[in-house]
Image (cartoon, rainbow, N blue to C red):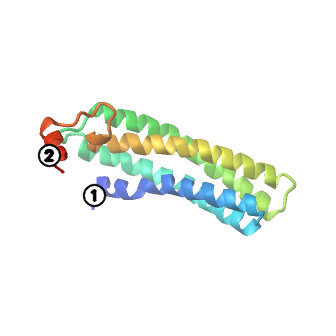
Amino acid sequence: MNAAHLHLLINHLPILGILFGIFVLLAGILLNQTLIRRVALVGLIVAGVSALPANKTGEEAEEIVEHLDGVSHDLIHEHEEKAEIFLFMAGGLALLSAIGLWAELKNHAQQKFLNYIVLGVSLVAMVMAAGVGNSGGEIRHPEIRKDFVMPANSEAENAEH
């Protein structure tokens, strides 16, 4: 397994972790269940922290794929820029979730307020994570790019089916 393969395995952790964390935290808030909220906050901490190895393996993966045919340096650069910004967002989300977990454990008066803040930040982080993931996918999947044009021979094959 090389760094590119490892990056492809790890980079889904922050994206899916934040997505699941949002749903679990929302359920915990709506059901007023402390345990569910705590599980969500731990999950969001893990998701936020997992952005660090995803970013690190991305740097190493770049060295492997940047010289392959059909790989655009501009797309790699765009993905890298989005990933660096997201790394700070994910770290902030992990820290905020840890504070929220502490407030839950201490039954702090501001715990509900913190849960809503964590939920809001998680939603913003999810949008950012989706953008990072999509820009990474565009590096090796031209079919998901905005400027993709279906090859002429493929259109004829699709019409037959």
Query: Of the residues under marks 2 and 1, which one precedes in the sequence?
Result: 1
Mark 1, residue position:
2
Q: Residue at x 74, y 59 (%)?
A: 30
Percent position of residue 123, x then y: 61, 45
Q: Nearer the viewer, mark 2 or mark 1?
A: 2
Kindly report the distance in space between the C-alpha atoms of the residues bearing marks 2 and 1.
36 Å
10 Å crowding of disc 1: few (<14), some (14-19), many (20+) = few
Q: Is residue 5 visible?
A: yes
Q: Give the vertical position of 72 relative to 94 (above or below).
A: above
Nearest the camera: 42 or 20? Answer: 20
Mark 2, residue position:
157
Percent position of residue 43, x then y: 60, 61
Percent position of residue 20, x then y: 56, 59
Q: Which quarter of the image is occupied by the N terminus?
A: bottom left
- Which amino acid type is shown beneath numbered disc 2? Glu
- Give the structural element (helix, strand or loop) at label 2: helix
Residue lying at the far right of the rendered structure: 109
- Give the structural element (helix, strand or loop) at label 1: loop
Q: Residue at x 23, y 38 (%)?
A: 71
Q: Please identify the quarter of the rendering in which residue 26 is found.
A: bottom right
Q: Residue at x 84, y 51 (%)?
A: 110
Q: Residue at x 80, y 49 (%)?
A: 113
Q: Is residue 141 left or right of residue 129?
A: left
Q: Is residue 106 left or right of residue 134?
A: right
Q: Is residue 124 left or right of residue 71?
A: right
- Which amino acid type is shown beneath numbered disc 1? Asn
